[in-house]
Amino acid sequence: MKRFGLKGKRKVEKVDISELQEIPAKVLRNKRIAVYPGAFDPVTNGHLDLIKRGLRLFDHLIVAATNNPNKHPFFSIDERLHFIHTAVNGLPGSLEVSTFDCLLVDYLKQTKACVVLRGLRAISDFEYEFQMALMNRNLFEDFETVFMMPSVEYAYLSSQLVREVASYGGDITGLVPEVVRLAFQKRRSA
Ligand code: ADP
């Protein structure tokens, strides 16, 4: 097999791709579609940070807000979708905003997604995310969960924290998109 040198001492073997196991045509044809699921109650700049990272990595990203009224979200599903739509407007890349009210694995099958994108902030996220990822894999094997870390300034930011601060009239500028900040302001003055 032909060898070629790098600038340093190391020599790298050139890979003859005909020797590799054949990649199924289906995999080559499919775009890498990722689903970023979450409550987004409301979307924060931490979520947005992850969306931007996801857009760089995947061919198509679906930001999917869970629609489970039993969880009594602070903002309605229409409000949450509106916030996300407004916040992602103008971002480069192939992006879709949607909602689902079924098992995540069923949603993956429907959308032909092969990746679930989730965020990891502090260590406290790990156990829950680990359980969810393995449970979902147990239900359906044909996808991978990809975890990404946000910029350090968002590492401790959560929707719940934003709701708490905003409910006492605290300043949430810089933590959420402007459309969300205004929505909290409107709620307080209603
Ligand atoms: P869920 O109830 O599904 O956790 P969230 O909207 O709270 O819904 O979070 C959705 C995903 O976004 C989760 O993977 C969560 O870890 C991630 N996430 C939330 N806030 C941040 C943040 N500040 N930085 C990075 N990831 C985040």
Image (tube, rainbow, N blue to C red):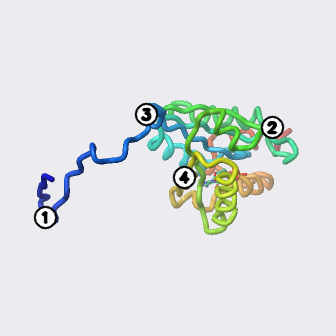
The kind of residue on which mark 1 rests is: Gly
Mark with earlier residue (2, 4): 2
Asked which secondary structure carries label 2, the reply is loop
Mark with earlier residue (4, 1): 1
Q: Are marks 2 and 4 in contact (CB under 8 Å)?
A: no
The local crowd at label 2, few if under 14, some if 14 to 19, many if 20 or more residues have their Cα within 10 Å, is: some
Q: Which label lies toward us, 2 or 3?
A: 3
Q: Is mark 4 within 8 Å of ligand 1?
A: no
The kind of residue on which mark 4 rests is: Val
The local crowd at label 4, few if under 14, some if 14 to 19, many if 20 or more residues have their Cα within 10 Å, is: some
User: Looking at the image, which residue is at 74% across and 55% down?
Assistant: 160
Task: Identify the mark at residue 74; answer none if there is no mark.
Answer: none
The kind of residue on which mark 3 rests is: Ala
Asked which secondary structure carries label 4, the reply is strand
Q: Are marks 1 and 3 in contact (CB under 8 Å)?
A: no
Q: Is residue 137 above or below residue 185?
A: below
- According to the image, label 1 marks what residue? 8
Q: Nearer the viewer, residue 70 or 190?
A: 70
- According to the image, label 4 marks what residue? 146
User: Looking at the image, which residue is at 58% across and 45% down?
Assistant: 142
Q: Nearer the viewer, residue 124 or 154?
A: 124
Measured from the top left, where is residue 178 in percent x and y?
63, 40
Q: Are marks 2 and 3 in contact (CB under 8 Å)?
A: no
- C-alpha span from label 1 to label 3: 37 Å
- According to the image, label 2 marks what residue? 76
- According to the image, label 3 marks what residue? 25
